[in-house]
Amino acid sequence: MIASETSPQLPAKMQYDPVDFVLDIANHLHVGDRRAIGLSICAVLSTYIANSEGLHIKATGGSGKGKTDLLDLVTTILNPGKVLRASASPKAFFYHKIRAGTIIYFDDYKPNDDLDNFIKNATSKFHEALDHLTVNNGKPEIKKSSPRLVFFVTSVNPDQGIEVLNRSIMIDVDDSPEQDRKVADLILERAKTGEIRRPLTDDVIECQKFFLELAVEEPVIIAIPFADKIKWADPSNRRDLSIFLDVLRSVTFWRRNIREIDENGALMATEEDFKTAKQFFYGEDTCSLNTYRLTKSARELAKILYCSYPKGLTREEVAEKMEVGVSRISQIKKELDHVPGYREENKTECDYSDDIITYNDTTKTTKRITKTYTVMYMSKSLETGAVYLDR
């Protein structure tokens, strides 16, 4: 059975590939960051998948570099009403009528213990409604939150609240000088033609209509027939494998109008979907060190260590290469703790100065200087890539 028999029909322009069509339109409104946009949409589509554990977006980057613009763009091309952008107390989720599968968008998120606890529980039990016990006029009541909530969170600090979204996809916007120039050119082009920042063009309306028709009331099952061929380089990293498979399922759902359904009614992923998911997940560099769960700075640090192996580097040496302070390296390297192949080694060196110390005018010795420092290493054992298909 072909899914398109029961799925929304694509506009003529979108026949070649729904993924490329949407991303092409998105890049007209927001220059670059194609992979980050794709991952954000995958997080949205995880709300429609019964065997997804949910995907959430943590966007980081310098102030004014486009992280908010990126997520604003995604909310523009989605079906209206899918995203709720507002400040909220944790109890608000139990008292307001929020539709299941809503995207909760927190811009410039500030950690809050109570709200952090709600987010942690809501994401851990993605398909379940959480209970809140309260009293109304002396009578006990149970208020329930909505299931399948997905969170979009932006912050300047990549470490902020990172432990809360334990199934978050870490994305950081391109803040390179080349990207700055492209953005400036786009702003000037809009000024020349008088185009508004978020024009409601025919293409944008087609995107909104497509996502509206793509939506389902009851989540669907996605099957991956070739799952036994998927090779994951680090079996101990269970969470990241689960997240990658959810990205793959979302890509399949994105293309559900051109995907087959098996005898059990499950939508079937293809190897083309696997390739797209891998591109989203790792970007152009498929080396396992470029895992999406690292910030850009941590990936840069990992690659520097990776290229220097088997020789390790000290924090001072890495700081010089990255042109940052040594204290910043101490912060960044914490992200590498879960990356296979990374290790640290404390070393001690002894040296003797030319200074002569005299005791009682008879005993003479030289002064011993002890220096302890940390050397960081990144093994090359995973050069083949983190995920691939066994042929």
Image: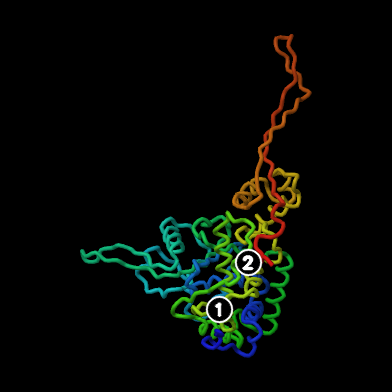
Q: Looking at numbered disc 2 in the image, what kind of residue is underneath it?
A: Lys
Q: Which mark is first along the chain, 1 or 2?
A: 1
Q: Quadrant of residue 346?
A: top right
Query: So how many labels did they put on this image?
Result: 2
Q: Which residue is mark 1?
A: 76
Looking at the image, the residue that sits furthest to the left is 138
Q: Looking at numbered disc 1 in the image, what kind of residue is underneath it?
A: Thr
Residue sitting at x 70%, y 77%: 188
**Is residue 58 shown to the viewer in this render?**
no
Residue sitting at x 53%, y 65%: 153
Residue sitting at x 49%, y 70%: 51
Q: Secondary structure at mark 1?
A: helix
Q: Residues within 10 Å of mark 2 (few under 14, many from 20)?
A: few
Q: Quadrant of residue 363?
A: top right
Q: Secondary structure at mark 2?
A: helix
Q: Which mark is residue 53?
A: none
Q: Position of residue 283 (x, y in %)?
A: 68, 66
User: Is 319 situated above or below 31?
Assistant: above
Q: Position of residue 241 (x, y in %)?
A: 58, 61
Instruction: Please state which of the two labelled residues, at mark 2 or mark 1, is closer to the viewer.
Output: 2
Q: Which residue is mark 2?
A: 229
Image quarter where the N terminus lies is bottom right
